[in-house]
Image (cartoon, rainbow, N blue to C red):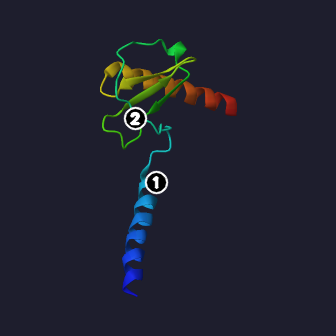
Amino acid sequence: MMKMKRVFLPLCLLLLTACCFDASRNHDVEESPYCCVEFSSVRLPLSRVKNIKKTARSCPVQGFIVETRTKRICLSKSSPWSQQIFNRFHNLTNTADEDAQR
């Protein structure tokens, strides 16, 4: 009986943590499962951006992963320019989605 309690309690805590973590996630913006170790300072034109995602919350340094037609580039989340391109990209894609629904 004691062994079952030792297994059951940690399992319940793990499931509870997983449920709470998933419920607290922001589902408006897709999150990448990857982390960045180096960040680029190159300013890409918005027309070259095919997709942009936030790095995983578990990453030691938060950033954005920008996908172009040929490669992926990491941008620092602390850069005003990267915040701007992230917001502009998602505003354009949200506007396009709304137009497609009409």
Foreground mark, 1 or 2? 2
Residue 31, disc: none
Quarter containing the N terminus: bottom left
Residue at (36% x, 77% y) in the render: 6
Quarter containing the C terminus: top right
Residue at (40% x, 24% y) in the render: 74
Q: Is residue 91 visible from the viewing direction of this image?
A: yes
Quarter where residue 9 is shown: bottom left
Label 1, label 2: how far apart the Cα atoms are: 19 Å
- Relative placement, left or right, of 29 versus 57 is right
Neighbours of disc 1 within 10 Å: few (<14), some (14-19), many (20+): few
Residue 22, disc: 1
Q: Which residue is mark 2?
A: 35
Mark 1: which secondary structure?
helix
Disc count in the image? 2
Q: Position of residue 23 (x, y in %)?
A: 46, 55
Q: Nearer the viewer, residue 66 or 96?
A: 66
- Relative placement, left or right, of 52 versus 95 is left
